């Protein structure tokens, strides 16, 4: 562990960016609050005006918090740590790959490619690979065993690749990893935790281990995974946003996190002893969704490591870390439902003893990420109801004054507030695009003009799809609050295309909600219809948006660095997968011919 002075210096480095972010976001929220109060004061302030001002305060503060994080990320560059390891890597490392009802051919091809990439580094002797299966489907489990044996034989990996399937998948992924740490963790110094769709360069894995060995106080080192191999319009837009904007926002996040960094559950390396001593997760009292096993375990494990004095760090300079994402909006909403339940469950942990203040704030941010739409919906509903609570106009407020006094028009303040809120959403993205053009980073995304066009297209698509996502997210929050457990559904790994009928089946209730909102606004507050259309029209067109965005992308937009220069491990994984699938097809073709020949011989 570092001496107290070193720990204090590390905290001090995070104090300034945290303070700046908090002050700037609060100022933005307070400004929106005061501007709306002035708007409401024009026809007499009432309780609904105050309620709407408070809702605007909270919502604007939250938007400003995200904007400031992105702008802070532009203030610095990604840099490797000052401390470097001299000498060979001596720490023993296990690469953990939890699987749950996944296609073993695709998953194991990733493992084979990573193993080959590790072998090329010359340090592969320090690494083992453990596949931890929680698969409940016996047919898939049988294929896992078959393909594991084939991979071991093909890679010559006997004694350094292992597979085990749990009979009881208690605790889901977190319980799977915890079980391995308890039973086999003593054989290793470090553990690289992946997801089934994770892919990492061997050089990156070795570099992570070297950084952990060089700084013995680090309990967890998180990389920034890059979303890859998206094919649909939705997937490509999300992939571009993740590649273009996320590194900047992650850098701002890392500046504020300090020693209490993030853990996103995968593509991160942990110190086994620290993890074993600090990260045992309790089963919360009561039934899901707020009881049972901890779903968003990664945030909690990072907080527990920090509580024990270990450093949790995000190294955004590390490349060669990849993952895959949902290919359509419905699959995204299904995954988001699980995250929503996990984050809201953190209400039970906000006051857990001994946690660092910033860890508690991270829990609060995770909760806010899902309940923030409720504040916007509350504001819209309060605005519709406002005319019924407003006092009647008084045109003769001054006694004995014979001429009427009309309320001052405050439309300009309402427009200014709308522009300010929209600015909080788009300003960071425009700033990132300008920085990319000036720094030359845009070359990796197809050049400055194509990058700017892609940014505008992504901004337009996210603006149109945001009300649909808001509807799904709001439903998820209410489901959790009403006690409905969403469980842990299997991720869909297909091509993602949805027909209009399938999109309608998954979003008809969004259309109904949009129509009801339009009718209610028209009847109760017709003056607000124009202001509500940007929200209600996308909801009414949800099936069209979902189906259209799930189709293959054909434009030249949304280029990412991986499109221009494919990572070696990605290329090798694609080749291995093609070879394996070719062998499967050949075996299916040969089997009937062989059987016929055998019958003829008999």
Image (cartoon, rainbow, N blue to C red):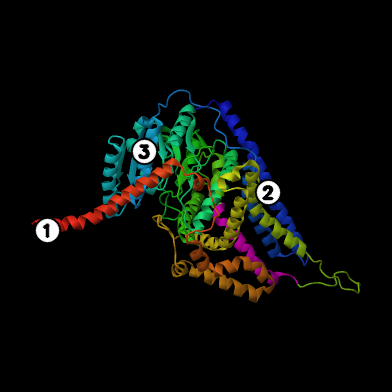
Element carrying mark 2: helix
- The span from disc 2 to disc 3 (Cα, nearest Å) is 48 Å
Q: Are marks 2 and 1 in contact (CB under 8 Å)?
A: no
* Rendering quarter of residue 97: top left
* Magenta residues (range): 368-391
Q: Is residue 384 magenta?
A: yes
- The span from disc 3 to disc 1 (Cα, nearest Å) is 42 Å
The nearer-to-camera label among 2 and 1 is 1
Number of the label disc, if any, that sits on residue 599: 1
Q: Which residue is mark 3?
A: 115
In the image, what residue occupies the spot 34% across and 44% down? 132
Residue 203 seen anywhere in this rendered image of the structure: yes
Decide if residue 234 is on the left or right side of residue 63. Answer: left
Decide if residue 292 is on the left or right side of residue 222. Answer: left
Q: Are marks 2 and 3 in contact (CB under 8 Å)?
A: no
Residue 341 % position (x, y): 47, 55
């Amino acid at each position: 562990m570092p001496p107290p002075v070193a720990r204090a210096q590390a905290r001090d480095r995070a104090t300034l960016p945290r303070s700046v972010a908090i002050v700037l976001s609060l100022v933005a929220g307070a400004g929106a609050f005061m501007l709306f109060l002035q708007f409401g004061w024009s026809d007499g302030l009432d309780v609904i005006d105050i309620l709407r001002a408070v809702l605007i305060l909270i919502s604007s503060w939250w938007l400003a918090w995200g904007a400031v994080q992105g702008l802070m990320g532009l203030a610095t560059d990604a840099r490797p740590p000052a401390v470097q390891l001299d000498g060979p890597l001596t720490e023993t490392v296990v690469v953990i790959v939890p699987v749950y009802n996944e296609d073993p051919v695709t998953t194991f091809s990733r493992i084979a490619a990573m193993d080959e990439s590790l072998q090329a580094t010359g340090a592969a002797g320090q690494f083992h690979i453990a596949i931890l299966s929680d698969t409940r489907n016996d047919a898939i489990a049988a294929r896992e065993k078959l393909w594991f044996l084939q991979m071991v034989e093909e890679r010559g990996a006997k004694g350094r690749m292992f597979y085990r399937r749990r009979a009881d998948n208690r605790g889901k992924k977190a319980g799977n990893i915890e079980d391995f740490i308890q039973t086999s963790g003593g054989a290793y110094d470090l553990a690289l935790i992946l997801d089934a769709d994770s892919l990492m360069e061997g050089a990156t894995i070795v570099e992570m281990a070297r950084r952990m060995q060089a700084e013995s106080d680090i309990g967890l080192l998180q990389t920034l995974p890059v979303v890859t191999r998206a094919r649909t319009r939705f997937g490509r837009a999300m992939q571009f946003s993740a590649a273009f904007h996320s590194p900047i926002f992650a850098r701002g996040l890392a500046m504020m996190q300090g020693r209490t960094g993030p853990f996103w559950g995968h593509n991160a390396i942990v110190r086994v002893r620290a993890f074993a001593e600090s990260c045992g997760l309790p089963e919360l009292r009561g039934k899901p969704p707020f009881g049972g096993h901890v779903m968003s375990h990664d945030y909690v494990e990072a907080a527990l490591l920090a509580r024990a004095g270990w450093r949790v760090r995000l190294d955004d300079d590390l490349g060669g870390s990849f993952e895959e994402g949902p290919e359509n909006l419905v699959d995204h909403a299904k995954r988001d439902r699980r995250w929503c339940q996990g984050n809201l469950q953190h209400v039970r942990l906000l006051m857990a003893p001994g946690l660092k203040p910033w860890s508690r704030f991270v829990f609060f941010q995770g909760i806010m990420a899902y309940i923030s739409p409720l504040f916007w919906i509350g504001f819209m509903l309060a605005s519709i109801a406002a005319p019924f609570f407003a006092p009647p106009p008084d045109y003769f407020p001054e006694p004995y004054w014979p001429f009427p006094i009309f309320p001052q028009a405050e439309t300009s303040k309402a427009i200014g507030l709308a522009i300010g809120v929209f600015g909080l959403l788009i300003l960071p993205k425009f700033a990132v695009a300008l920085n990319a053009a000036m720094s030359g980073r845009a070359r990796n995304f197809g050049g400055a003009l194509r990058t700017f066009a892609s940014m505008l297209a992504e901004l337009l698509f996210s603006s149109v799809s945001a009300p649909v996502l808001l509807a799904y997210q709001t439903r998820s929050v209410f489901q959790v609050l009403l006690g409905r457990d969403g469980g842990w559904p299997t991720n869909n790994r297909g091509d993602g295309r949805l027909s209009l009928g399938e999109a309608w089946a998954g979003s008809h209730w969004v259309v109904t909600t949009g129509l009801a909102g339009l009718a209610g606004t028209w009847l109760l507050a017709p003056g607000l219809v124009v202001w509500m259309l940007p929200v209600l029209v996308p909801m009414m067109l949800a099936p069209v948006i979902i189906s259209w965005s799930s189709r293959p992308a054909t434009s030249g937009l949304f280029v990412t660095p991986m499109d221009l220069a494919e990572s070696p491990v990605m290329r090798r994984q694609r080749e291995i997968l093609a070879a394996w699938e070719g062998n499967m097809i050949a075996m299916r073709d040969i089997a009937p011919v062989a059987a016929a020949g055998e019958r003829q011989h008999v």
